[in-house]
Amino acid sequence: AQKITQTQPGMFVQEKEAVTLDCTYDTSDPSYGLFWYKQPSSGEMIFLIYQGSYDQQNATEGRYSLNFQKARKSANLVISASQLGDSAMYFCAMRELSSQGGSEKLVFGKGTKLTVNP
Amino acid sequence: DVKVTQSSRYLVKRTGEKVFLECVQDMDHENMFWYRQDPGLGLRLIYFSYDVKMKEKGDIPEGYSVSREKKERFSLILESASTNQTSMYLCASSLKLSYTFGSGTRLTVV
């Protein structure tokens, strides 16, 4: 079963508008963390935002905010005032303990391709 | 800034060849990872390592092995390359909540 589900293969948004990228997750571990990364066409992975499972408030970083709904197991990324440079792939990822307990690892969703139209 | 360097940006190898993908990080990160990225499938974890000589299988380890003889270097080995291993390979390292990714190696197996 998928641990991270991103149901939107592609999304379109007009420049200057807000957009929400969906992410749901599945874990039975009470301690976990959720990341969002941006991958432009150049291929680099750019960290955007992090939400810990015990964080009381939703994370925000500039134009990025995370709509964290723990009971629904969702961690949607909200980008406000979209810019042309926001066009990229966006990945949701979850930090979880390895099965052998030796380390933590990141598990990724399949990604959402965001296109910002002028 | 932490740097994760992958030795090759592009590689073309023949079916059946033994292929080595190298990854080096310049900070004292305990954890290192190898992912492959395919369109529509996202990033899938192949192997990871949390210490020298320690390794764990990820979600898709078949056809791959890894080596971590020194803390800063994590190698991915394709024992006998096949065409279905044509992909983008991403290396990453981490310390606590900070993950840093390399630029990727695009491997084509012909």
Image (cartoon, rainbow, N blue to C red):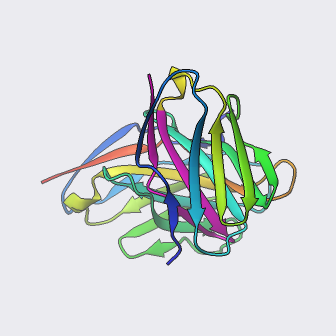
Point 65% across, 39% down: residue: B77
Which residue extends farthest left? A118
Q: Is residue B96 magenta?
A: yes
Q: Main secondary structure of the magenta part?
A: strand
Please state the horizontal and vertical placement of residue A107, each as a whole percent of the image. 63, 48
Q: Nearer the viewer, residue B3 or A84?
A: B3
Left or right of B34 in this view: A41: left
What span is in magenta?
A: B87-110
User: Which residue appears at 44% of the width and 22% of the height?
Assistant: B110
Q: Is residue B16 above or below residue A30?
A: above
Q: Residue at x 63, y 25 (%)?
A: B80
Up-down relation of residue A30 to residue A113 (above or below): below
x, y percentage for residue A3? 66, 42
Q: Nearer the viewer, residue B49 or B99?
A: B49
Taking the magenta stretch, the answer to whether it contains residue B11 is: no
**Picture coordinates of residue A92, whole percent (x, y):** 52, 52
The residue closer to the viewer here, A27 or A69, is A27
Q: Quadrant of residue A56?
A: bottom right
Left-right relation of A56 to B21? right
Residue at horizontal 40%, vertical 68%? A64
Where, by quadrant of the figure, is residue A65 drawn?
bottom left
Residue A56 seen from this side: yes
Mark yes or no: residue A17 visible: no
Looking at the image, how many numbered discs can be counted on the residues? 0
- Give the x, y percent position of residue B15: 53, 21
Q: Between residue A58 and residue B71, name the one nearer to us.
A: B71
Tell me if B52 is positioned left or right of A79 in this view: right
